[in-house]
Image (cartoon, rainbow, N blue to C red):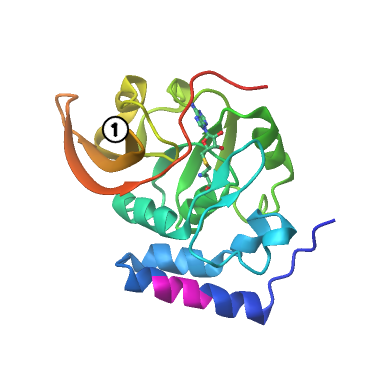
């Protein structure tokens, strides 16, 4: 049974991680504060307890990963999260990215295609702390038409293309942060939706994500 303890040691390591993210160029203080407030080791197997605050990705179940803190901070910063933003996230995974967004005051609609990972959300340790995270089992390529439109969309898996249905579900003036497949790596893009339905595109750094796959599993 995993013990959920957030010790002074964990807090100290977390502070160092936040300083390292700042050194690497993250300037969104609200994102850094959220990362500082959330015990990332709670989202990992206890075997990773000591190294949870290294700036790297770790395996969760079903061959998936919890994104590297730098990646989480980077995508969050590009999203320009405001309190009460309604955000659609594709790829719930460990629920860490969702928690960062919820900690910043957003309402998060998050979709996961792996049934086993989705089921883990039922026992999510921070259910009471983040009632603003809504969990869905489904295929992220479809989005959530019933709950659209969204202020922001964040994709946390390598997208082979920009999913047209997700663009449709974005508000005018809204933004989508999406790592798009370019072979081995993905280029981080930010799309801003124009009044005529088209998108303006900005390109940022390259990252490496697990693939965004079609259909549900399980
Ligand atoms: N945001 C997560 C990152 C998890 S890795 C975190 O903070 O931990 C990416 C996740 O995207 C995996 O769990 C994978 O199963 C999921 N995924 C991949 N393709 C998907 C799709 N089409 N719809 C929903 N989830 C998808």
153 and 45: which is toward the camera: 45
Q: How many marks?
A: 1
Q: Is residue 99 visible?
A: yes
Q: Position of residue 213 (x, y in %)?
A: 48, 25
Q: Is residue 207 above or below residue 55?
A: above
Q: Secondary structure at mark 1?
A: strand
Rendered image quadrant of residue 167 = top left
Which residues lie in the magenta part?
15-20
Rendered image quadrant of residue 93 = top right
Q: Residue furthest front?
A: 184
Q: Residue at x 41, y 76 (%)?
A: 19
Q: Is 19 in the magenta?
A: yes
Q: Residue at x 54, y 73 (%)?
A: 14
Q: Position of residue 2 (x, y in %)?
A: 80, 58
Q: In which quadrant of the rendered image does the C terminus lie?
A: top right
Q: As drawn, is 23 to the left or to the right of 16?
A: left
Q: Is 218 in the magenta?
A: no
87 and 47: which is toward the camera: 47
Q: Is mark 1 within 8 Å of ligand 1?
A: no
- Pointer 1: what residue? 171
């Amino acid at each position: 049974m995993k013990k959920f303890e957030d010790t002074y040691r964990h807090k100290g390591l977390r502070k160092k991680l936040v300083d390292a993210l700042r050194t690497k160029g993250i300037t969104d203080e609200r994102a850094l504060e959220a990362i500082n407030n959330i015990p990332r080791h709670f989202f990992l197997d206890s075997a990773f307890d000591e190294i949870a605050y290294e700036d790297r990705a770790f395996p969760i179940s079903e061959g998936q990963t919890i994104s590297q803190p730098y990646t989480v901070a980077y995508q969050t910063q590009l999203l320009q999260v405001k309190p009460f933003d309604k955000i659609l996230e594709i790829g719930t995974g460990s629920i860490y990215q969702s928690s960062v967004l919820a900690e910043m005051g957003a309402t998060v609609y998050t979709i996961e295609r792996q049934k086993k990972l989705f089921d883990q959300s039922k026992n999510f340790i921070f259910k009471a702390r983040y009632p603003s995270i809504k969990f869905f089992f489904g295929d992220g390529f479809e989005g959530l038409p019933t709950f659209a439109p969204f202020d922001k969309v964040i994709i946390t898996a390598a997208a082979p293309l920009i999913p047209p249905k997700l663009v449709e579900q974005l508000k005018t003036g809204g933004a989508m942060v999406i790592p798009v497949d370019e072979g081995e790596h993905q280029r981080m893009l930010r799309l801003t939706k124009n009044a005529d339905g088209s998108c303006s595109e900005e390109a940022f750094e390259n990252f490496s994500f697990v693939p965004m796959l079609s259909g549900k599993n399980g």
